[in-house]
Image (cartoon, rainbow, N blue to C red):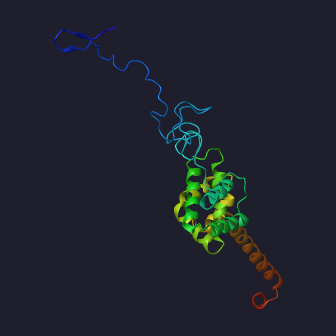
Amino acid sequence: PQTNMQIPGGPAIAPYEPPGARGRGAPPYVPGANFTPGYSPFVPGAMPGVYPGGSPGGFPGTMPGGYGQSPGGYGQAPAAPVGGIGLVKSLLEKISNGSTLPGPDSAKRICTTCASTQVTSPQLSESICERARRVYLGLEGGSDTDGALSRLLTLTDAMHQQEGLGSRAAMAVVSSVSEEFLSLQYSAAHRVAAEPQLRRLGLIKGPSAAESVDLLGESSPAPSSTSGAGQMDLLDMGGSSMPSSTSHDLLAF
């Protein structure tokens, strides 16, 4: 142990202490010292240093920003909206993948949902266009791209035949995704069903292939009937004025 050294009659000289020697070792325990309100040095089942009730950016059992507790944590994804436009998009997804059949009933259901959840016609049309574009580009997965587009076209056609919100949304869809719908003309499986719908929506003009065949079929028997009638007239009217006069002239000469 070091002791103070003092020269007789001179000043007292403190013993030498190396740098860092002061403060070595744990400080003596003093009850209530260094206490932070809200801090618990030990929480059963938690990691050291966890605040009761948690703190931003903490571990399980913490306040917003933690791993698994409140919104914004690492282990949770934001939940999809249940009502409003989220419900409409869910219905469109079911129609697109074939879980729900498109038609007047599904169109009426979507329009009723929009009216009850305050979804406007621009929002509805944008949702349908977004689904059609993703299907056309193959971003929804699956191999039946033409089938999904055909179902969306059928839904749009059914909405176009309604009044109010459905009709307005259908016209906006036609003007936005006409290229996607017109691609169904080159689908061997869906062309026959798609062409009348495209014609009603104003995307294609002129008669369909079936109508042109009917026109040709109706025009073909006309000459035969006319020729047959003419032939019958000639045969039946053998004693008409013209043949009779000719025969009389010949006999006269």
On the image, which quarter does residue 181 sit in? bottom right
Q: Quadrant of the N terminus?
A: top left
Question: Residue 197's spot in the image, x, y percent?
Answer: 65, 65
- 29 displayed left or right of 106: left
Question: What residue sits 59% from the left and 55% below the top?
Answer: 131
Question: What residue sits 50% from the left and 40% below the top?
Answer: 57
Res 253 seen here = no
- Residue 51 drawn above or below residue 163: above
Question: Residue 113's spot in the image, x, y percent?
Answer: 66, 66
Residue closer to the observer: 31 or 89: 31
Question: What residue sits 72% from the left and 53% below the top?
Answer: 99
Residue closer to the observer: 237 or 200: 200
On the image, which quarter does residue 253 sit in? bottom right
- 34 displayed left or right of 84: left
Question: Residue 215's spot in the image, x, y percent?
Answer: 69, 70
Residue closer to the observer: 245 or 34: 34
Question: Residue 19's spot in the image, x, y percent?
Answer: 29, 16
Question: What residue sits 54% from the left and 58% below the top?
Answer: 179
Residue that protrudes farthest toward the left in the picture: 9
Residue that protrudes farthest toward the front in the picture: 9
